[in-house]
Amino acid sequence: MADFHHQTGFGLSADARNKLDSKWDSEVANAVSAWIKSKTGEDIGNTPESFFKSLQSGVLLLNLLNVLRPGSVKAPQQSKMAFKQMENISAYLAGCGLPSTDLFQTVDLFEQKNMSIVLMNLKRLKDKFA
């Protein structure tokens, strides 16, 4: 059963989803997941779905930044409200210190539009702080 944020499409929509899903790099996901676990203690798995579920609220992203650079971003808002979670993601993007070419759009994560670009952003962050 498809969930609310990740509807299975048809036609061009399904083709676009399949193309994005095919860009997921499991080897990179394993490395990023292990790195995040080493920094935060959180296991986010290594699939697009597990990354989405772990990161959608933005809380873990902000916690990660605060481990890497203490006090660099505000404390995350612990809320089930969509706009608060999107604010967390936006705060992460503003505070991660990566060039705009390495950033994703909030909806890429929040609406699970493009988890591959989220993964690549986290890889760049990992490389920056390795």
Image (tube, rainbow, N blue to C red):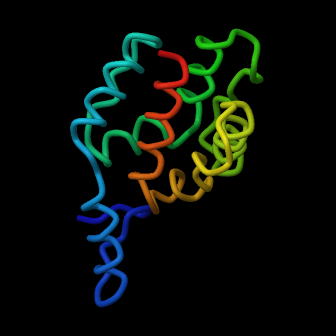
Residue beneath the point at 40% across and 11% down: 41
Residue beneath the point at 29% across and 79% down: 14
Residue 23 at x, y = what percent?
Answer: 30, 58
Residue beneath the point at 76% across and 12% down: 71
Tell me where residue 80 sits by quadrant: top right
Count of numbered labels shown in the rendering: 0
Q: Is 62 positioned to the left or the right of 8 in the image?
A: right
* Quarter the N terminus occupies: bottom left
Residue beneath the point at 41% across and 52% down: 115
Residue 123 at x, y = what percent?
Answer: 43, 34
Farthest residue to the bottom: give it.
11
Residue 120 lies, with reference to residue 33, above or below; the image says below
Residue 81 lies, with reference to residue 79, above or below; the image says below
Residue 77 at x, y = what percent?
Answer: 70, 30
Tell me where residue 10 sits by quadrant: bottom left
In-front residue for pair 82/14 = 14
